[in-house]
Image: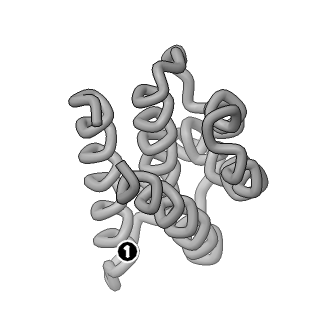
């Protein structure tokens, strides 16, 4: 595994841990933060796979665009398109006034992120 791939994976795992920690807060949980870190985890895992395959990507946060770049080397991941489209919404808009995530949105983001992470960990385990 390339060193840069390992760095992306470590950063993805840090976002996953932050997402889970914040989701357990009982006093004023930050659902926007949960959703943002779910998106970030998926983004960084996608970028890890792209780096490992030598597929270039810009400074983008659109998970579907990143997924489409990864599908040639991971065709089975196409099944995540809908869930990654959902997570993509949390990259920018929910970090600013105007939109706010609620608990149900956060629980959905955790589920989608966790399912995608499982696929990525299977890929990592095969490296």
Image quadrant in which the N terminus is located: top left
- Who is closer to the viewer here, 98 or 22? 22
The type of colouring in the image is: one colour
Residue shown at 71% from the left, 45% from the top? 75
Query: Farthest residue toward the bottom?
Result: 26
Image height of 26 relative to 88, above or below = below
- Who is closer to the viewer here, 11 or 32? 11
Q: Which quadrant holds residue 125?
A: bottom left
Give the crowd class for mark 1: few <14, some 14-19, many >=20 residues within 10 Å.
few
Residue 50 in percent (x, y) is at 50, 29
Residue shown at 33% from the left, 69% from the top? 22
SS state under label 1: loop
Q: Is residue 75 left or right of residue 126?
A: right
Residue 58 in percent (x, y) is at 52, 14
Residue shown at 70% from the left, 55% from the top? 80
Q: Which residue is mark 1?
A: 28
Residue 87 in percent (x, y) is at 62, 52
**What is the number of callouts on the image?**
1
Image height of 123 relative to 88, above or below = below
């Amino acid at each position: 595994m390339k060193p840069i791939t390992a760095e992306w994976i470590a950063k993805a795992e840090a976002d996953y841990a932050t997402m889970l920690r914040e989701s357990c807060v009982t006093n004023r949980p930050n659902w926007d933060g949960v959703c943002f870190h779910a998106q970030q985890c998926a983004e960084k895992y996608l970028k890890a796979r792209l780096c490992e395959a030598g597929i270039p990507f810009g400074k983008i946060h659109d998970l579907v665009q990143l997924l489409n770049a990864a599908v040639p080397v991971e065709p089975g991941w196409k099944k995540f398109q809908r869930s990654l489209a959902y997570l993509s919404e949390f990259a920018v808009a929910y970090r600013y006034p105007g939109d706010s995530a609620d608990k149900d949105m956060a629980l959905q983001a955790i589920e989608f992120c966790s399912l995608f992470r499982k696929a990525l960990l299977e890929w990592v385990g095969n490296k």
